[in-house]
Image: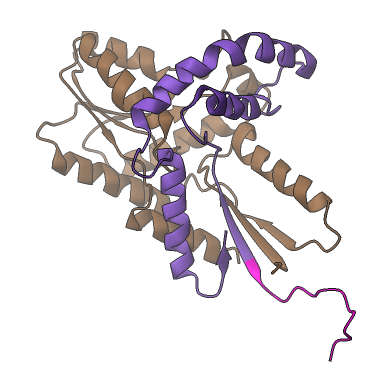
Chain colours: A brown, B purple
Amino acid sequence: MGCENLVILPLYPQYAAATTATVCDEVYRTLMKMRWQPSLKIIPHYESDPLYIDALVNSINKKINEISWKPDLIIASYHGIPKKYFDKGDPYHCYCHKTTRLISEKFNSIKIKTTFQSRFGPQEWLQPYTDKTLENLPKEGVKNVLTICPGFASDCVETLEEIQIQAKESFLNSGGENFDMVPCLNDNNDHIILLKSLIERNI
Amino acid sequence: MIEKNHPPIKYGNTGVLIINLGTPDSTSWFDIRKYLREFLSDRRVIEVNPLLWQIILNLFILNFRPSKTAKAYKEIWMKDENMSPLLYHTKKQSEKISNLLSKKTLL
């Protein structure tokens, strides 16, 4: 059974060339080989969609209700990209800050700071770095930190291992007292409603 | 009526594809290496001269990096389902959206 229409939803809320554009490239490459191509709709990035922001805010509130301590600061950690890509015009950095700003507007009781994780190789990446930030916070008196990774639609090695295991360990070793991570939206109800809505608006 | 030897016709179906990053098949050194090779060969991910990068990738990174990455994946691997959390959650998302979108095919 073939399809006459194809709708693509890249699960990257913040556009970056290395993620969203790679998905598009692959789709185009596949269509190039077809005699009877389907019509194509690629759903754009959704970093400021109200349903997305609400889903993130709800997930933070849920976590805060589960833990027995009050966070001094929330770290919104996004996957980094080399700074050079930003200098060449990749809009990713701005979209990450936009998401954090929109969460902050609905959540003004605790300050939220944007950081970038998963650095790889010797060159400079987007700053501030998540790992360095977490190591320095206890020295500045910030010892209770909650982390959220809004750019990841699902929990993966970058959230579960890099943040929940590695970053937690280094934060606590640097003098931090409490650390926790808000799970990604995964298959929670708010997320499914968001994704369904994105699809329906583009079908 | 369509003639018997008429080529196949696609009817008005709409397919929806949700796409996230790839993930290794298992935590074995070879599967992790295969995953890293594909991911790090993406020229939008690594914007270095492709020829030079393939040399660096094959000589150094694909020999030293897989064991480190495998260790990270072993910490979080979902043993009962025998898959990475990313694949597990993406499948769940796809199932749940599929159930909500009537008649639409979600792959």
Residue A56 relative to residue A82: left or right: left
Residue B86: x and y in percent read 44, 40
- How many labels were placed on the picture? 0
Residue A34 vertical placement versus B65 (above, below):
below
Q: Quadrant of residue A184?
A: top left
Classify the position of the C terminus of chain A by image quarter.
bottom right
- Residue at 52%, 22% in the rendered image: B29
Q: Can see residue A160?
A: no
Q: Can see residue B58?
A: yes
* Magenta stretch: dominant secondary structure: loop
Residue B38: x and y in percent read 64, 29
- Residue at 29%, 10% in the rendered image: A136
- Residue at 21%, 46% in the rendered image: A62
Give, as a single range, the part of the protein colored magenta: B1-14
Q: Quadrant of residue B42?
A: top right
Residue A27 vertical placement versus B25 (above, below):
below
Residue situated in front as seen by the camera: A170 or B55: B55
Residue that extends furthest to the left in the rendered view of this protein: A68
Classify the position of the N terminus of chain A by image quarter.
bottom right
B13 is within the stretch colored magenta: yes
Residue situated in front as seen by the camera: B2 or A50: B2
Residue B1 relative to residue B26: left or right: right
Residue A49: x and y in percent read 46, 51
- Residue at 56%, 38% in the rendered image: B22
Residue A9: x and y in percent read 57, 53
Residue that extends furthest to the bottom in the rendered view of this protein: B1
